[in-house]
Amino acid sequence: MIALSLALTGACAAYLFWGLGPKWQFVLSLRAGKLAGMLLVGAAVAVATVLFQTVSRNRILTPQIMGFDALYILMQTALVASLGLSGFASLTAPVKFAVEVAIMIAASLALFSTLLGRAGQDVARLILTGVILGVLFRSAAGFLARLLDPNAFAVVQYASFASFARVNTDLLPIAALLTCAAICAALWVAPRLDVLALGRPIAVSLGLAHDRLMLLALSLVAVLVSVATALVGPIAFFGLIVAGLAHEAAGSGRHARLLPMAMLIAGIMLVGGQTLFERALGLQSTLAVVIEFVGGLFFLWLLLRGRIR
């Protein structure tokens, strides 16, 4: 934990102070906002993935399998199709962010509460429903995209890919409030999450309110993933990498240790990777593309290693 904290501090210092130049005050303020956004997104995705894997009791699943990314892309496409380029551009960032987060949280909570209320023991049905909804959202987004002119389609494509370089600092206060509240709640119930990970029969026999805690955990996942996706765009495999590395580094399934380590690893990966791409490589590629590529390889490695449980 100490080593990871020192590594994250070093990565943050390198991102802030490497190559400041003469106008260091302006550059430093600009980098500080982006740094805060990356740390928020990293912490949100890390905690959400660990919680979702605890609920599903599967180390290869991520919250994105529930269709959050597809719903986000559908919203971008629908906004451009209904408002046009001028109307989409005139949307203020706070309003757009609030609408996106509210829709994603409402949709996920409706899904979780309905399915868990009917079959609290059947998490597989919940995940399968999320997969089906994701396919539906992608199909609807693809249909709307075919109705757009090339300029509007280019705008949708730009808004549908994650970018850590375009974090809007005006959104950070509300994003930080939601993220910190959800993370504090996750850390507060960390001991009960350890019991939840044992499975429903054992958890119930130990006196745990299993269904209520599961709904709380999924609600926290919905908030964290919605905020992170609305802030930088969809990230499919980043949480999978972070959660896998956190399990290996922690050497324990206790969430009081696992959650902080996952947040530290996520911060190191995002800040260190963005520093490398911005300062050393001159933005010749994007961090999100590399994360998706490495995450896909990591997913295949987990399958071949047989770490499904």
Image (cartoon, grey):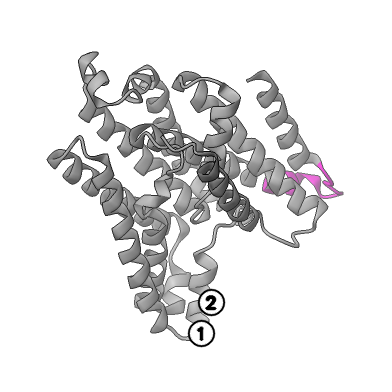
Quadrant placement of the C terminus: top left
Instruction: Tell me what residue is drawn at x 23 percent, y 25 percent.
Output: 210
- Kindly indicate whether the residue at mark 1 contacts the one at mark 2 (C-beta within 8 angstroms): yes
Query: Would residue 91 be visible to someone looking at this image?
Result: yes
Query: Would residue 41 be visible to someone looking at this image?
Result: no
Q: Identify the amino acid type marked 2.
A: Ala
Spot occupied by residue 108 in the image (x, y as percentages of width and height): 29, 48
Compare residues 245 and 140 and report the one nearer the observer. 245
Work out whether 236 lies above or below 250: below
Compare residues 303 and 226 and report the one nearer the observer. 303
Work out whether 258 lies above or below 290: above
Q: Which residues are magenta?
A: 18-30
Instruction: Tell me what residue is drawn at x 33 percent, y 72 percent.
Output: 140
Spot occupied by residue 105 in the image (x, y as percentages of width and height): 31, 48
Work out whether 200 lies above or below 168: above
Q: Secondary structure at mark 1?
A: helix
**Which residue is tagged 1?**
150
Q: Secondary structure at mark 2?
A: helix
Q: How many marks?
A: 2
Q: Identify the amino acid type marked 1.
A: Pro
**Which residue is tagged 2?**
154
Spot occupied by residue 47 in the image (x, y as percentages of width and height): 46, 34
Instruction: Tell me what residue is drawn at x 50 percent, y 45 percent.
Output: 303
Q: Magenta stretch: residue 124 in it?
A: no
Q: Magenta stretch: residue 29 in it?
A: yes
Quadrant placement of the N terminus: top right
Work out whether 292 lies above or below 302: below
Compare residues 33 and 201 and report the one nearer the observer. 201
Compare residues 141 and 177 and report the one nearer the observer. 141
